[in-house]
Amino acid sequence: MHPFTLAALLALAFSIEPTLSAADWPQFRGPDRSDKSSETGLLKFWSSGGPKQVWLIKNAGLGYSGISVVKGRVFTMGARTDSDSQREYLIALDEKDGHELWATPIGGLYVNNWGDGPRGTPTVDGDRVYALGGQGDLICAEAATGKPVWKATMKSLGGKVPGWGYCASVLVDGDKLICTPGGGQGAMAALNKSTGAVVWQAKAFVDDAHYSSIITANINGQHQLIQLTPKFITGVNAKDGQVLWQSDWQGRTAVIPTPIQRDGQVYVTSGYGAGCKAVKVGAGNEVADVFANKVMKNHHGGVVLVGDHLYGYSDGSGWVCQDFKTGVEVWSSKAFGKGAVTYADGMLYCLEEESGTVALVEASPKGWSEKGRFTLAPQTTLRKRDGRIWTHPVVSNGKLFLRDQELIFCFAVR
């Protein structure tokens, strides 16, 4: 090999950032939005004090924004005081010790009695990070530096801020960034991820924006985007925004959990008594109900599908295991309070919203089998009157990440 060629290759190698690790967590609910980590070799039991704390930061700012972990960086959002005003920021931390790498303003502060600040989770794609603030301000920034690349707003797409703020986490699909502005111009929209220019808006999909996040699916050879809104479960052609199929949903007060799809069966759930429903999308995009019941009434802590079983908290019933194929309840338990869940290496990581207690539970259709618990300490003193610990837990690179407003915790779970 020519010396110049070798030198050029070496220079190129050192100029490229590390590629996405299989254990990274680049967006809300993980790489495929299933809330399941592919990691192995994690702890199966916790001692009475819980896993070892690696670090704690106390200045993330207010909000319920989730955690993304990519290439040694931890991304989130938070509301901070800037001079005499408060703004929402996109923030990057060092995964090793939690020290702040950069913070970039997103937009104005979203305010309500359940807690001020951003709700969604940043989405990382290559050397870019995308984040949607509570007021509907959207930013694309350099992941390494936080330098803004472009900005947009949900208002410019006809969107109106939902009652509890914009909560949905934006989705990267190929060369497009997908969002849910809601409103009469089209509830879903695709932007060019490099420039922010509008590629399409789903004009036939008209509903308010609520709080669920979009998933991708390939059903009957069609690449599509699936979203849950107050009135509908909707499948949209990812290429052009045309509605492929739609099924009615009685969303009531708020629709929050993310849809789950497998083999053309789409499962949704929401709280306030709405319950759950599964539909099957046929070869001609006809939609048939598989089941609809009240076994799972998940408010906002999320549901995970492990094998043929769904796990999550159901209002009134406690923690529930539900058969994905039939909708039948397999078991329920009130051994642990209401909260959020994620999955890794055969275990459920459950975070109780009232107390801040975290439980390690075997994901088994045989019943609730707890393998340890601990309680977060310290806890925030800045929580609003109606607020709770609502940020979902994340397991990435052998670590458990938890958040209580301005406090972000990192624990070693390998």
Image (cartoon, rainbow, N blue to C red):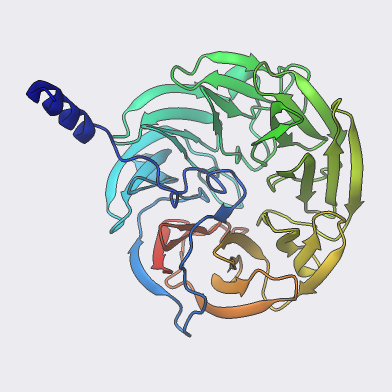
Is residue 61 or residue 328 the one in the foreground?
Answer: 328
In the rendered image, residue 237, in percent from the top left (x then y), is placed at 71, 22
Q: Is residue 225 left or right of residue 151?
A: right
Q: Is residue 24 left or right of residue 329?
A: left
Q: Give me the residue at 47% from left, 43% from top.
A: 26
Q: Is residue 203 left or right of residue 109?
A: right
Q: Give me the residue at 58% from left, 18% from top.
A: 156
Q: Give me the residue at 81% from left, 67% from top.
A: 316
Location of residue 318 with respect to 283 vertically, above or below: below
Q: How many marks?
A: 0
In the rendered image, residue 280, in percent from the top left (x then y), is placed at 85, 40
Q: Is residue 79 in view from this perspective?
A: yes
Location of residue 207 with respect to 332 vertically, above or below: above
In the rendered image, the residue lying farthest to the left is 3
Q: Is residue 413 left or right of residue 242?
A: left
In the rendered image, residue 104, in percent from the top left (x then y), is placed at 35, 35
- Looking at the rendering, which quadrant does residue 249 occupy? top right
